[in-house]
Amino acid sequence: MGWDVVQIGLRHNLPIDDPIATAKEIATRMKQNIQLVAREFYTPDSKKNFTKHCYAIELGTFKVNESDKSLRLTVLNCQINQQQDQIVVEDLKNIQFVDKCAGFLVNDWERPIVLYELDYNDEGDYMQFFRECINLDICVNERWWTWITKIHEKDLEDNWLWNCRKRIYDRAKMFGCNEVIICSDQGSTWLICEYLDKSADELVAYTKARRYIDESVWDDEKEKEEWITHGKLILFSEYFSGTSAELLSYEEDFVEVVLDDFKDLESLDDANEE
């Protein structure tokens, strides 16, 4: 299995606590009609028994054009949050589950809380929206190793790399994200993806401290030490300007995480507007 490129947009400005307002805002920004649905998974009763179902409740469609097509925005985990408020931790041992599937409710409580998922094409691709972060889900068919090889080559004239970064920038900017973290969904950096429900500041601090390395399971200490020594975090704009050229100074060095604040692209946009 190839290593996918994950792009995490930071500090979006969507009205995330209001599903209706969020759906309207996404429809306006994407210039696409949005169908808003809520997905329910569990049905509790007064005795704290749970049975598992899976069905969608339509909350409304928000049209911004005359097309008969709509993107689906799904509200997730609001039911889990409500149930957590109703059940204190001490009561968990007393919960009776009607079937094995319903027992996964407790596991759902322990996962990063995704607030919304947006199905944005017919290929089954979707973005995930958290309180401050977004899994932007820009498809990079060539996967992670092509991505970092292109960066390592440091070719500013490479249209593939430029177009890929521009797509990330355009989607991040659409949702008000002022920075992104770009990493692989495998290797030690997959743990970054487990922190998407944290604040953007917490996620950046976690990433810059490279805490995922110590939290990963390694086959041996030598492999871990090689990753610590040769894995590099780069800031995209500084790296290409030459400020951080020394970061990849050894043949064994590789890009571990890319941080991008888009400052150079924003400057180009400002110049074009003038």
Image: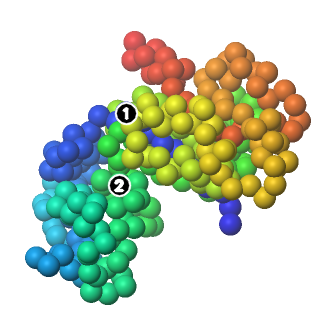
Q: Is residue 151 above or below residue 63?
A: above
- Which corner quadrant holds the N terminus? bottom right
Q: Which residue is mark 2?
A: 114
- The label shown at residue 11 is 1
Q: CA distance from mark 1 to mark 2?
A: 15 Å
Q: Evaluate whether residue 179 shows in this view.
A: yes
* Residue density around tag 2, few if under 14, some if 14–19, many if 20 or more, within 10 Å: some
Q: Is residue 147 above or below residue 239?
A: below
- Which corner quadrant holds the C terminus? top left
What residue do we see at 32% from left, 43% from top? 131
Q: In the image, is 27 to the left or to the right of 217?
A: left
What residue do we see at 80% from left, 35% from top? 229
Who is closer to the viewer here, 223 or 65?
223
Tell me the kind of residue under disc 1.
Arg
Residue 269 occupies quadrant: top left
Q: Of marks 1 and 2, which one's residue comes earlier in the chain? A: 1
Tell me the kind of residue under disc 2.
Val
Q: Evaluate whether residue 55 shows in this view.
A: no
- The label shown at residue 39 is none
Q: Is residue 232 above or below residue 99?
A: above
x and y percentages locating residue 238 in the rendered image = 64, 20
x and y percentages locating residue 200 in the rendered image = 42, 34
